[in-house]
Image (cartoon, rainbow, N blue to C red):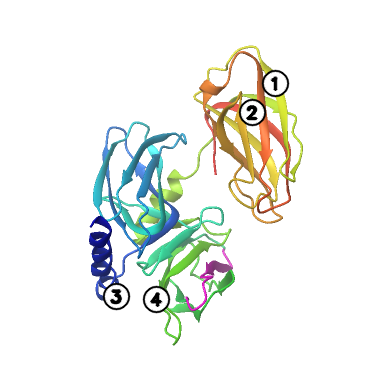
Amino acid sequence: MRHIALLLFSLAVLPLWAQEAPQTILRHDNYLVFVGNAGETVKIAATSIPRGAYQDDLQVKIIDRDSRVVLEQSVPVGTSAEIAYQVKTPGLHVVGTVTGQSLATVRVVGKPFGLVAWEKTTLWICGGMAPQYFMVPAKSKKVEVYVTSDVTTEGATVKIVQPDGKVALEKTDDFDTRTKLEAPVPTGMDAQAWSLVVEKPNAPGLIFDDVEVYLGRNLPPYLCEKPEWLAEFLAAGHVDEQIIERVPLKTQSLSKGAAFTTTFTLAALPQAKLVALRTTAQDVDYPTEGTFTVNGQGKYQIPTTGDGATAVVTTLIKPEHLRVGENTIEFKHDDSGSSAMGLSETELIFGNAIQVE
């Protein structure tokens, strides 16, 4: 009976997307941001929406500016919840959402919030997206937006709109492969909020369903429903690092499912709030390709860099996983989707503020 009721709920909800004002329907893994003040109670409104036979519950977690998970909650499929969190560490917070194959709407109640649309943490929508604003920095010459809708018969109409309301670019396509949409920035149109519209394709034979979107590297990775909200995240997103100690580590490239260990000695545990492993990683194609444990604890992941790409990446480590004396870190490679990845210039960093992707 529960599955029948959920299916009826799904059928009742889905047609309303086309009738009501556009709202952003999330699918898979997504991230929202808000700026919290110390002692403030922030409320997150979340609805978990079944999708046909898919019955995955919505998972929500809140991460504070020190990259600590401060709240985790599950929202059963077919239900809504208002999640309250009292801010302890002021500053930029991230709301991580995982829907599986189900859908969700998630928003911060009564205060500015944004959606993250970055190459490493793309925005996944399904069947609806409210118009979103993004900032074009001063002296920018072009705007780049990347779009994918890789299922046959699915597609979208995408519009990039200038601050004066002129449509700088409009494209309707199936977007079966990742597509870069590029629009020039006219004189006087930089250092302002532009807008992005992703909507039902105005072409026969295409339906509006799963679409992946992210902004080009020259753009701050935030999308907001109101242009005045953007300044808050641009100011709060930067962290001036406060590093107390660095411990160099010997590492090597990983390939063909192999593993290796590296050891180091701590005469004492530095008195720092945060500990992280920072490395120059190459060709990390998916989150599980490179993982590591610290003294046999945790299953930490090397952040993805993209196919063939190199980036300096940082992974926070729980301080309680370290000990005085000899420590061991074991790195493992998952070759289910890639044959090799690289690691170099690896170190442990201890500090009171650490910048994490």
Marks 4 and 3, the one that precedes in the sequence: 3
Horizontal arrangement in the rendering, residue 92 relative to residue 144 (left or right)? left
> Which numbered tag is attached to residue 348?
2
Marks 4 and 2, the one that precedes in the sequence: 4
**CA gap, disc 4 to disc 1?**
58 Å
Q: Is residue 307 above or below residue 74?
A: below
Q: Secondary structure at mark 2?
A: strand
Residue 101 coordinates in the image, percent (x, y): 42, 58
| Front: mark 4 or 2 | 2
Q: What amino acid type should be assigned to the residue bearing mark 2?
A: Leu
Q: Quadrant of the N terminus?
A: bottom left
Residue 33 included in the magenta stretch of the image: no
> Which numbered tag is attached to residue 165?
4
Marks 1 and 2, the one that precedes in the sequence: 1
Q: Which residues are magenta?
A: 140-154
> Which numbered tag is attached to residue 264?
1
In the rendered structure, are the residues bearing label 1 and label 2 in contact, judged by CB atoms less than 8 Å apart? yes
**CA gap, disc 1 to disc 2?**
10 Å
**CA gap, disc 3 to disc 1?**
58 Å
* Residue that badge 3 annotates: 18
Marks 4 and 1, the one that precedes in the sequence: 4
Q: Residue furthest front?
A: 1
**CA gap, disc 4 to disc 3?**
23 Å
In the rendered structure, are the residues bearing label 4 and label 3 in contact, judged by CB atoms less than 8 Å apart? no
State the image quarter where residue 291 is shown: top right
Label 2 crowd (10 A; few <14 / some 14-19 / many >=20) = some
Q: Residue at x 25, y 62 (%)?
A: 4
Q: What amino acid type should be assigned to the residue bearing mark 3?
A: Ala
Q: What amino acid type should be assigned to the residue bearing mark 4?
A: Gly
Residue 96 coordinates in the image, percent (x, y): 41, 47
